[in-house]
Image (spheres, rainbow, N blue to C red):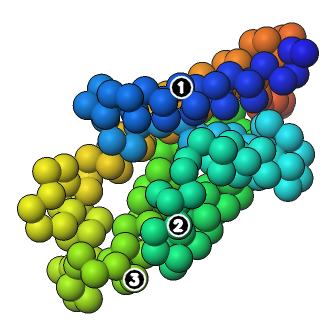
Amino acid sequence: MKRFFPVALLIGLLVAFRLIGLAMPDTIPMNFQPLAAIFFCGALIATGWRGFLIPLAAWVLSYPPSQSLGEPAVFVTTLGAFGLVFLMGSRFVKAGVSTLLLGSLASALLFHTLTGGAAWMFGGLYPKTVEGLWQSLWSGPAGASIPSWAFLRNMAVANLLFTAIFVLARFKWTVPNAVLAQPRPAMAKSR
């Protein structure tokens, strides 16, 4: 039972944030949710591709298909970006907590860049120029009430927070006296 606690916790958080966001859209900042952190921490959830399939199932179950399938190229890019976030997190499994947290911030930047680039490339909201790409990544479409950088900021903060919660849950309640990274042996003093 203890080993499933972190998975249940993050999926519960995902569903709760999704339902609160639907019921009270002004309560939670846009893009502040645990989904990317679940993908980032997927390799801590399960080994191999199961670590990707669990967050993927949570995404499919918590988001209406109509929202996910708007523009097929953007959907495929989003899925690919989540896959890269998972692979990035997989590389940090043996790292220390600070490395995992920094990796979660880097994964937010990667995700934002890929999905913003896809919105620019495949959507009709931005001109197909360097300025249009910058607009999709930073300021958002003309007349938008929330700039794109706010989505990046909210995702970065959410990734940091939910990765920290997951790591705490994973190692506090499932592995007694767990250490994410082994200390390096002291080097002998040379004379």
Q: Nearer the viewer, mark 3 or mark 2?
A: 2
Name which of mark 2 and mark 1 comes first in the sequence: 1
Disc 1 element: helix
Left or right, residue 85 beside residue 181? left
Q: Residues within 10 Å of mark 1 (few under 14, many from 20)?
A: some
Distance of label 3 from label 2 (alpha carbons): 13 Å
Residue farthest toward the left in the current orientation of the protein: 143
Distance of label 1 from label 3 (alpha carbons): 31 Å
Quadrant in which residue 168 is drawn:
top right
Res 28 label: none
Q: Is residue 85 above or below residue 33?
A: below
Distance of label 2 from label 1 (alpha carbons): 22 Å
| Whole-percent x, y for residue 120 in the image | 33, 77
Amino acid on which disc 2 is placed? Leu
Disc 2 element: loop
Q: Nearer the viewer, mark 1 or mark 3?
A: 1
Residue annotated with mark 3:
122
Q: Residues within 10 Å of mark 3 (few under 14, many from 20)?
A: some
Disc 3 element: helix
Residue annotated with mark 1:
16
- In this rendered view, identify the residue nearer to me: 82 or 64: 64
Q: Is there CB contact under 8 Å for labels 1 and 3?
A: no
At 75% from the left edge and 29% from the top edge, which residue is drawn? Answer: 7
| Whole-percent x, y for residue 96 in the image | 68, 33
Res 69 label: 2
| Whole-percent x, y for residue 190 in the image | 79, 35
Name which of mark 3 and mark 2 comes first in the sequence: 2
Q: Residues within 10 Å of mark 2 (few under 14, many from 20)?
A: few
